[in-house]
Image (spheres, grey):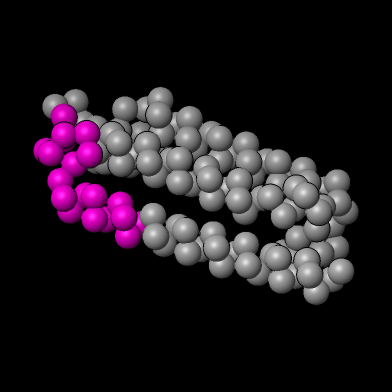
């Protein structure tokens, strides 16, 4: 994990970690609230909530790693902590993709929960 982070500007790694954590929490909210999920409709509410809680904890670990492990190589990164303009563009595209995937999954879960009520 450290090797993969060593090629990112520091702030890009931190923003990415926060984005993944937010995505995990948003994805787990329907399961935490209702105790049901479309992925495993046969699971009990207690089991679904336990799995969702583990997902939230995993998201917390991701953001913790993003802030604790130094992402930049020892000599620094060209363009500073945010990197070059290309780094910022790639980060923006990546954030858009994470948001789109999270939104699609949330929409699917809400449709499943409404259909079952």
Residue 33 seen in the figure: yes
**How many discs appear?**
0
Q: Nearer the viewer, residue 70 or 96?
A: 96
Please tell me which residue is depicted at 72% across the width and 55% down the height of the picture.
30
Residue 6 seen in the figure: no
Q: Nearer the viewer, residue 72 or 116?
A: 116
Task: Please tell me whether residue 112 belongs to the stretch shown in magenta.
Answer: no
Task: Please tell me whether residue 93 belongs to the stretch shown in magenta.
Answer: yes
* 66 on left or right of 108: left
Query: Residue 100: x, y in percent?
Result: 47, 64
Query: Residue 108: x, y in percent?
Result: 65, 69
Please tell me which residue is depicted at 12% across the width and 39% down the height of the picture.
79
Query: Residue 19: x, y in percent?
Result: 45, 46
What segment is highlighted magenta in the picture?
A: 76-94
* 25 on left or right of 69: right
Please tell me which residue is depicted at 56% across the width and 35% down the height of the picture.
60
Query: Residue 103: x, y in percent?
Result: 55, 63
Please tell me which residue is depicted at 15% across the width and 46% down the height of the picture.
84
Question: Quadrant of the rendered structure where residue 10 is?
Answer: top left
Against 107, residue 80 (above or below) is above
């Amino acid at each position: 994990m450290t090797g993969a982070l060593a090629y990112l500007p520091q702030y890009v790694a931190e923003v990415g970690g926060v984005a993944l954590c937010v995505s995990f929490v948003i994805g787990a909210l329907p399961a935490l609230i209702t105790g049901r999920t479309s992925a495993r409709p046969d699971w009990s509410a207690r089991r679904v909530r336990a799995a969702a809680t583990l997902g939230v904890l995993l998201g917390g670990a991701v953001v913790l790693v993003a802030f604790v492990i130094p992402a930049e190589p020892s000599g620094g990164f060209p363009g500073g902590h945010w990197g070059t303009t290309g780094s910022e563009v790639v980060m923006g595209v990546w954030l858009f993709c994470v948001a789109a995937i999270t939104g699609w999954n949330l929409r699917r879960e809400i449709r499943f929960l409404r259909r079952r009520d």
